[in-house]
Image (spheres, grey):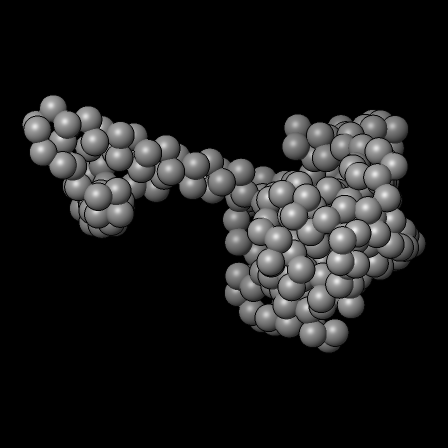
Amino acid sequence: MATGRTHRPATRSRGIPEATVARLPLYLRALTALSERSVPTVSSEELAAAAGVNSAKLRKDFSYLGSYGTRGVGYDVEYLVYQISRELGLTQDWPVVIVGIGNLGAALANYGGFASRGFRVAALIDADPAMAGKPVAGIAVQHTDELEHIIESNGVSIGVIATPAGAAQQVCDRLVAAGVTSILNFAPTVLTVPDGVDVRKVDLSIELQILAFHEQRKAGEEGGAEAGHEAGHESAPPAEVTRAAAAAADRKGPDGDVPAVMPA
């Protein structure tokens, strides 16, 4: 079994790089917004700005789809929506099960974007017997004892794990054994899965830690610039400040010798 594997190889059967695949949902979201406003065409610059990428990268990504746009006109919005939806497999209905109906699981169940993006919540599953039968987002919660039967009867291939970290691997193992081949993991732990199973991890604490790093860096750069100005000499270049701060963080934590790590 492969440990911590979170993606397939770098390219897929049709030769589309994984990095391009990761950007396709961004393009689709921007295009869907344009379609809802009845915008017929869009330039690569406008679409790239809406998706948060540069236009050269967008044009390269679309070349893998066989879309090159029309000079002076741009890209046909509706056709691109169809192309990207087809490439992402969203032209069919994908049944999804959510395991772990706590605050996060209930919020996911109530998310209205699943149906409009090609996904259907087929079942909500929780280990707490007191939750069984309770409606969440109009769907009755079912006990984990029924997990395998639910997956088989609904043809589920995508599972969402929103359990505490300690239960996540066991849930993952049961999902995989029952035939689930794609997992979206919200639990703060790394899952071990066999080859042929894809795992995408969503960890809010990690994203916040990355933001904290950038905030610290900006504060350090601003403080260094002010100190340099008051002392009447130039402050260290931002890149040097960043490297020094990163090196110090690697060497020393709160106890003097271990890097500081926020709990998940």
Across and down, in percent, residue 26 comes to 68, 47
Please name whichever residue, 178 or 188, is drawn nearer the observer in this view of the structure.
188
State the residue at coordinates (66%, 32%): 104
Q: Nearer the viewer, residue 57 or 139?
A: 57
Specify the quadrant that holds the N terminus: bottom right
Is residue 72 something that shows in the picture?
yes
Q: Please tell me whether residue 235 is drawn above or below residue 95 in the rendered image.
A: above
Displayed quadrant of residue 148: bottom right
| Total marks placed | 0
Res. 169 in view: no
Of 85 and 117, which appears nearest the observer? 85
Q: Is residue 67 left or right of residue 190?
A: right
Left or right, 183 with reference to 66: left
Q: Position of residue 118 (x, y in %)?
A: 85, 48
Extreme front residue here? 72
Q: Residue at x 88, y 37 (%)?
A: 38
- In the displayed structure image, the side of residue 243 where residue 119 appears, left or right: right
Give the image location of residue 77, x and y in percent: 83, 48
Q: Residue furthest top?
A: 230
- Quarter of the figure with residue 15: bottom right
Say which residue appears at 86% left-offset and 44% top-offset: 40
**Could you say which is closer to the camera, residue 38 or residue 221?**
38
Q: Name the residue: 73% across, 42% down.
A: 30
Check the image and report above or below for 59 versus 132.
below
Residue 230: x and y in percent read: 11, 24
Instruction: Find residue 144 and report its image quarter.
Output: top right
Asked if 96 appears above or below 233 in the picture, the reply is below
Image position of 74 (left or right of 232)? right
